Image (tube, helix red, strand yellow):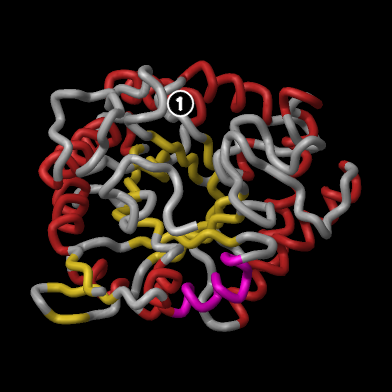
Amino acid sequence: MIVSCLLLLVALVCSSRALNFRGADISSLIVVEDQGVQFTDNGQVRPFEDILRTHGLNTARVRVWTAGQYDLSYGLEMAKRIKGAGLTLIVDLHYSDTWADPGHQAIPAAWPTNLSGLNTEIYTYTQSIVQSFAAQGTPIDILQVGNEINNGLLWPVGEISVNGIDPVSQLLHSAVQGAKSAGSPHIQVHLANGWDWSGLDSFFSGVFIPGALSASDIDIVGVSFYPFYDAGATLAALQSSLANLAGTLRKPIVVAETDWPVECPGVNLTEPSIPVSVAGQETWTGDIRDVLQGLPDGLGQGIRESGLFRALVCVEREWS
């Protein structure tokens, strides 16, 4: 199977060109290639990461699970290709044997199940991840410690609704210290629902605790922004929420996950004036760019398409 990606890439790049980070999560690239998929640019088959670079993207993210399909060895192989194409490498640690998101943050099967043990485990695991990428000559540029951790990570120990936010602060601090002991990647914390200021405020107003996570541990804040999960996920709400976040944290902000579909039957999108099409994708990313560029002091830094292999339809997960 041969897939042409030029239109979608043009939509994303043209709409986000002025931002520092113009990227995509391409974690499933090897998975789809193993299914016989090839990618073309102007009719010529080329490595997908090279197509990204040619058309102006400069960043790629790869997820890493503690086991399963997207394990460390898979991430290392992806890193060779990402770095080989001259792209900034973001590694997204899910701290789980499978998907981590607002509804799933399961402790890995081989990990301890108490807070003390998990603090030690997440420190040594994060340290080893950073060391492994550096050892093969592909050092991590940005390390994402957890994926959409609005209600914490490593449940139920680090589940905010069960045990409060103190365990989360400890666990994130341990992860950051493990990373810093092995190198100097920029640290990103990533929450879902970037349009929901009350949710962001609840997390960040409580997570910085003396002796645990501090604001200085974080370099970048990433948020997800999808137009089909909640009626409140409008561009106006995103603008208001991120303006508040920038004013509160004074940290660089990226929209770490987003997409706009070209097919979405039976689903109400939050911006009905935007067409469900490739042209609509360009409008959507352009509107997000405008929100980010409107943040004070240049704190709006970038957009990452959450998966170019699934942006055609309105579904959450790609090639699982």
Quarter residue 270 falls in: top left
Residue 8 horizontal/vertical position (percent): 19, 55
Q: Nearer the viewer, residue 308 or 91?
A: 308
Q: Amino acid at mark 1?
A: Leu
Q: Nearer the viewer, residue 191 or 313?
A: 313
Say whether residue 160 is left or right of residue 308.
right
Residue under pointer 1: 245
Residue drawn at x 79%, y 62% is 124
Say whether residue 195 is left or right of residue 200.
left
Residue drawn at x 29%, y 72% is 48
Say whether residue 187 is left or right of residue 314.
right
Q: Which residues are magenta?
A: 69-80
Residue 35 horizontal/vertical position (percent): 39, 74
Quarter residue 151 falls in: top right
Identify whether 193 is placed above or below 70.
Answer: above
Residue 243 horizontal/vertical position (percent): 37, 23
Say whether residue 131 is left or right of residue 113.
left
Element marked by disc 1: helix
Identify whether 275 is placed above or below 240.
Answer: below
Considering every residue shown, the one lying at the far front of the view is 266
